Amino acid sequence: MNLQYNLTVLSNWDIIDSMEKAKYSISSLPIVLICILLCAGNCGQQESHRDGKIVLDFWQFWTEPDAKSVIDSLVDEFETANPNIQIDITDLTWSEGHSKIVVAFSGGDIPDILELGSDWVPEFSSRGALLDITEQISDIIPERILWEPVIRDGAYYGVPWFLDTRVIFFNKDLLVAAGYHEQEYPQTWSEFLAACRRIDRLGDRIHGFGANSYEKHRLYKKFLPFAWSNGAMILSSDFHSSVDSPEMLEALKYYLQLVETGLVDNQRNLDMAFMEGKLGFVFSGGWLLKSIEQNRPDLQYGVLPVPSPDSGMGISFAGGEYLTITSGSENPEAALKFVRFMTDPDNSVRLCKSVGYGFPGSKELPDDPFYYQNRNRLTFHKQLLNSRMPPAHPQWVYIEEIIEKMIEKGMYDKGTPVDLLRQADHEIKRILSEDN
Amino acid sequence: MNNTGYYSSHKGHFFISPWIITLLVFWLFPLLYSFILSFYATDVIRGTSQFVEFQNYARLFNDENFLAALKNTTIFVIGTIPFTTILALIAAVAINSNIPLKGLFKTSLVIPSITSMVVMALIFSHLYAPGGYVGSLMRIFGISPPAKGLLLSETTALPSIMAMDIIIAFGYYMLLYLAALQNIPRNLYEAAELDGAGAFGKFRHVILPHLKPITLFILVINTIRSFQIFVEIFVMTKGGPLNSTLTAVYFVYDAGFVKFNMGYASAAAYILFILIAVFAALQMKVFGSEKGAR
């Protein structure tokens, strides 16, 4: 209607002339502008009810067709079971999603339910953007794992939905070529380093360890497991810097030795080199399982837990997706119902299967052949139970950058490990003091 | 008569209003708003901001990342623009003469500059990778490329991106030069020939003076564009290794859209703005000064 009207106006010069006679001038532009802004503001406002139903806005990141269809069918099932609730899904992308969420908060155009990556939750919970749901979920807290990112001052701000960890992928053929028997795998730090060195000597185009080059938000995830496995921490539990410790020094020295045996490149190229059989070991996540399945089904490979300094299993770096409810939600009870439904392990498993990797938030391995008939996934699950997440500190994005710079300087011989740790400790202390 | 003028000017306003509104909303408003923001410490999620006077600016000049970014950006600008301009000029003069296959040359030189920068950056990432074509070429000439690959070595990362940028960009400027060359009247060449000028004499006394305005335009446009280098960095190196390819706009992006420190990012952007303005003004002064004499 409006468009038609406008077109008529445009084609009718007389009307424009008469408008001009009515002193329609450039001075009315600001008014037009304000109208547009007001409209934009209103259009962005989320509605909380429609046709007598509660409407919940759900922002999520699963956009590839297989995963999206599972999300859609789960939402359908929820709506059928709860006819008074309607879910509006908004899809976000990994590259733009974070900015979009932050901008949404600044503009007041916020969803009810928000999927957040594990490392994003503290940023939002520390600023009062998320709802404290401790009491409402107290019954499921003991049954689920990896709550760390959503806990702040003892309160819980979200529920684990989809979890994954990182393990060591190894190339069986290269291990055998380096003189290892089948079923003989490196387990301790020294065995692992020796294996990397032996494979690295196999040829010019063969490398031992796949070491990540400087990629923001990624490099530190590859180093922290070695620190954790050696008992070192970046921050103490009361958020003081504990970087400058003998355990951290050992871990850093060890990691730099590993780097020397390997190929330095970004994650995409490392995964690719591993699939092409050029890498003995690469530290990677569940996505590589799926990638190998699709691109190199004949690759002779296996997965190992993170090596530990002496014996037993090392500690790995877990990541995951969490469902949170925003503090501005007008229907927190309905939102909670939806969050509980989606994060129910049986429903999460369906999502994991569609993606090809990952685990629900439950402690027990789900009773599904997808998991118990696949040795690699079983190793992933064992490692998941032996995994940590980075400290849930609101300034973590600055702290991780310091850690990454430290590792990078070590990789390029820009200082001794002792000096690098001292420098990082100094910088982390500065960030922590600015925060207070 | 008078009436017609009145009407048509308002008709004009009406027709340019979509553009004016876009300009005000998406350009002028953010420009002014970010200037104000640069004096605030903002928390986007909480929606709070605090007036901090010149603290953002003061902190920037103590931030080793920002200083590295300014240094790298300046090296990039000074190191690419002369090459881009001279290559563009040589290519344009060559294509303007009667060389065989000139259509083919023209097309192949222009194609990189009209291809998406993301695509070009990905292609060059592969060319520069360990075992890639560029490394093999270097070996043929007896130079051993860094083992980690050109983009992962601190000394070669920025020069590699600069070389890529020159190769990609000069085709577009060549087109501009070509257009200017074709505007030079034939009779000037003939007059120069009568005066006994050879090929170089014609280039020196006929072509160069006529290309002055377009050269100034190319320099200024290319300076502004080069100061804003971002996509190449984002796709190829993310500022690494060891900050050796961190550029000013990448710094602004990281401060604003990764760490969401909008005030800090705005302050950095304004420093970049001042830097570009100074460079452009200098160029206009140096290259525009002899205008009256001609």
Image (cartoon, rainbow, N blue to C red):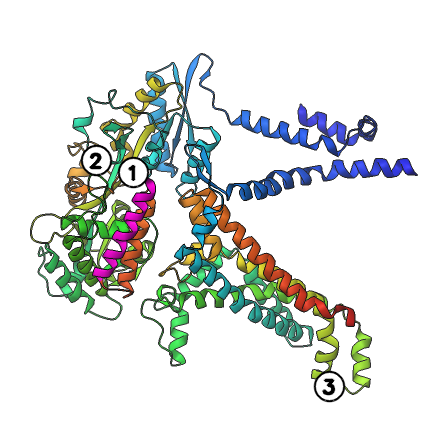
**Nearer mark to the viewer, of 1 and 3:** 1
State which quarter of the image contains the C terminus of chain A: top left
Residue indicated by mark 3: B198
Asked if the residue at tag 2 contacts the one at tag 3, i.e. Cβ–Cβ closer than 8 Å, the answer is: no
Query: What chain letter is assigned to the residue under label 1?
Result: A
Q: Amino acid at mark 3?
A: Gly
The answer to which quarter of the image holds residue A365 is top left
Q: Amino acid at mark 1?
A: Ser
Residue A118 is tagged as 1
Q: Amino acid at mark 2?
A: Leu
The residue lying at 75 percent from left, 68 percent from top is B291
Asked if the residue at tag 2 contacts the one at tag 1, i.e. Cβ–Cβ closer than 8 Å, the answer is: yes
- Taking the view exactly as shown, the residue that stands out farthest to the top is A52
Residue A305 visible: no
Q: Is residue B209 above or below residue B122?
A: below
Q: Are marks 3 and 2 on the same chain?
A: no
Q: Which residues are magenta?
A: A417-436
- Taking the view exactly as shown, the residue that stands out farthest to the right is B1
The residue lying at 83 percent from left, 38 percent from top is B8
The reply, left or right, for residue B112 in relation to residue A48 is right
Residue indicated by mark 2: A146
